[in-house]
Image: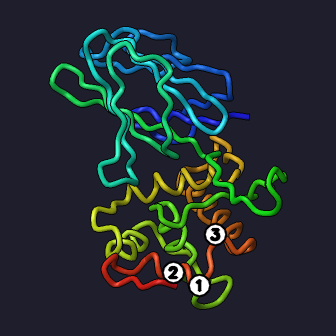
Amino acid sequence: MESIIIVPPGNAGPQDQLRIAPGERIVFGREVPESHLVLAHEGVSRSAGEIAAQGTFWTISNHSPEQTYVVENPEGAGEHVKIAPGRLDAPVPFEFSRVVLPAAGDLLSFDVWAPRHVHGVRRGAPGAAVTAPAFSLDRTTRYFAVLAALCEPRLRSVPHAPLPTIDQMVQRLRPCWPAVSRSSVAWNIDYLAVKLGMRREADTADEKQRAHGKKESLASLALRFDLVREDDLVVLAPAGSRVGR
């Protein structure tokens, strides 16, 4: 089963994502096989680097002799890792990341997801086995705020209330996430679908129908297993107005 998902620049949908299992590698660069990550920019080296899946995390190698790459945490406040020229197999700790490459005056980026990131809680006697959680969700992240906004109508009213549209979710999220956009909401919905182990819709399905089906499946799963509760809706409040639960 794949553990790392690479989202190319201008990704049009799940069919364009590259998925690799533990022990597998993907090379990225200007001239690499089509099954790898092709970055068609004259400022990118023919073989610029490599990404390797290592279970719940991944490593990156920088094949450039001169350029430093940066791996950013989109959820963080400027949190990032520098990958020096020639650095091999640098571990990346972020659950999802943005790899940024300088390219002849431009900055080229692509995303990497590690949706099987887990956070264990140690309980019981020392040395006792710890049961992995069925669904590992970080309630401080933007993807959880997106999930809360998606489920809010059914948490506040009737179980079968209509789900919000992407535009309605953008408006609902703006107080806690001023820079939110339609594309960022859609990106997080795609990420949640992968993280929660939902089956990919057939590529032959209508795009609008597929997007609605993904939202419906996400909301159904989250509400059925109490992944989002009514008191979690506090994540949608403006940051400065939140109080401890």
Quarter residue 31 falls in? top left
In primary-sequence order, the first of circles 3 and 1 is 3
Q: Amino acid at mark 1?
A: Glu
The residue shown at (47%, 70%) is: 165
- Quadrant showing the N terminus: top right
Left or right of 154? Residue 87 is: left
Q: Are marks 1 and 2 in contact (CB under 8 Å)?
A: yes
Q: Secondary structure at mark 1?
A: helix
Circle 2 — which element? helix
Are there few (<14), some (14-19), or many (20+) residues within 10 Å of tag 2?
some
Q: Residues within 10 Å of mark 1 (few under 14, many from 20)?
A: few
Q: Residue furthest bottom?
A: 157
- Which x, y percent locates residue 140? 48, 65
- Residue type at the position of mark 2: Leu
**Disc 3 to disc 1, how far (Cα)?**
13 Å
- Where is residue 10? Give x, y as percent: 38, 36
Q: Which mark is residue 219?
A: 3
- Residue 81 to residue 122: above or below: above
On the image, the x and y values in percent for residue 22 come to: 68, 28
Q: Nearer the viewer, mark 3 or mark 2?
A: 2
What is the x, y in percent for residue 162? 58, 79
In the picture, measured across the screen, residue 36 lies left or right of residue 80, that is right
Considering depth in this image, is 127 or 10 the residue closer to the camera?
A: 127
Residue annotated with mark 2: 233
Residue of label 1? 230
- Left or right, 224 with reference to 176: right
